[in-house]
Amino acid sequence: MIPVNEPLLHRRELEYVSECIQTGWISSAGKFIEEFEDKWAAYCGRRYGIAVSNGTVALQVAAACLGLQPGDEVIMPTFTIISCALAAVYNGAVPVLVDCDPRTWCMDVDQVKAKISERTRAIMPVHIYGHPVDMDPILNLADQHGLAIIEDAAEVHGAEYLAGRDTTKPRWRRCGNFGTLSCFSFYANKLITTGEGGMVLTDDPALAEKARSLRNLCFHGNRRFHHTELGFNFRLTNLQAAIGVAQLERIAEIIERKRWMGREYNRRLGDIKTLQLPAEESWAKNVYWMYGTVVAEESGMDAAAFALRLKEHGVETRPFFLGLHEQPVFQQRGLFVGERYPVSERIAAQGLYLPSGLALTEEQISRVSEAVHEVLT
């Protein structure tokens, strides 16, 4: 079975982790944590990085830093992982949804303006499967309405966006560079992994200090066990950060490998008329975190049937996200009642992603592509 994801770890990761063990710095203090924070923030063009235990809590910390009040609203795509909605709900806010773009599968930016109300406090653009959101319209709306941006960049390590296309000086900016606060995940299937792990980035020193406090139980600076606020235990370990530092040393190589994999799949699968392949808009540099596909209804299959057939050929897959508005747990809470988002509903039913891990070989890509052809042609 060709696995849907397999991380690629090298000798340097072992060297740095061994140093942690040999020196005893294995918990949430040690040189690799600060080094990972500083280097990842600098790579993304940000001033401050605050490492946390995973990407889900990075979003939760970011939302908490904004001081959201009960009933405040955060606009986000319905086509995303549940973590995005949890960040709002756990902070007493209400997630407000928009559909996704049928080409990029990122949030439909044209729908955002109509969802802004007097209770809106933030917009949460989520870059999907390696492709950036069209950020200029989001940035303009946030500026016009005085809204914060929580940028979910968990799936786009190193992806780039051409900002300011309607100006005389457009420029490429890395994802993670756009939000009031930006959030990353370093789960095992991400381009940069620490096993589990995440990070909050910001240019605001007050928000950075708030995030550091929240991740560490809000210990008071002068009296360690004296608390004036409620925080969380969301710390990253030095062991995990050591892996991240080692991986970051070869980020350019990792991105090129992912883009090569995307090109190879595109070349091998581009002739299948009943299969939608990932887009790369002219204003985006896709890093193909996961190689997503949408099988057409004319094939006579939905994603579940397609996945079963591929499994018979030794290919493991994963389904696309189920829209937040279709999640039973939110329906039980009375959220999103009667709301419909047809693009998200369709690709949730028809979409899956193929093996996409960094350890994937050219021979495996060939075998996956042959299996897809056998099933669909």
Image: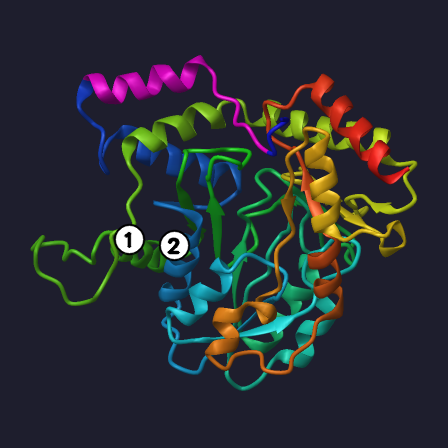
Which amino acid lies under the numbered mark 1 shown in the image of this protein?
Arg
**Magenta span covers which residues?**
5-22
Q: Is residue 143 visible?
A: no
Camera-side residue of 79 and 348: 348
Of residue 9 and residue 73, the one placed in the foreground of this image is: 9
Give the residue type that dot 2 points to. Answer: Val
Residue 182 percent location from the top left of the image: 49, 53
Q: Residues within 10 Å of mark 1 (few under 14, many from 20)?
A: many
Q: Are marks 2 and 1 in contact (CB under 8 Å)?
A: yes
Q: Nearer the viewer, residue 135 or 197?
A: 197
Q: Which mark identifies residue 215?
A: 1
Q: Is 282 placed left or right of 164 in the picture?
A: right
Q: Position of residue 286 (x, y in %)?
A: 70, 41
Looking at the image, residue 272 sits to the left or right of residue 135; the answer is right
Q: Is residue 345 visible?
A: yes
Q: Position of residue 216 (x, y in %)?
A: 23, 52
Decide whether the magenta segment is chiefly helix, strand or loop: helix
Label 2: state its secondary structure: helix
Question: Residue at label 2?
Answer: 57
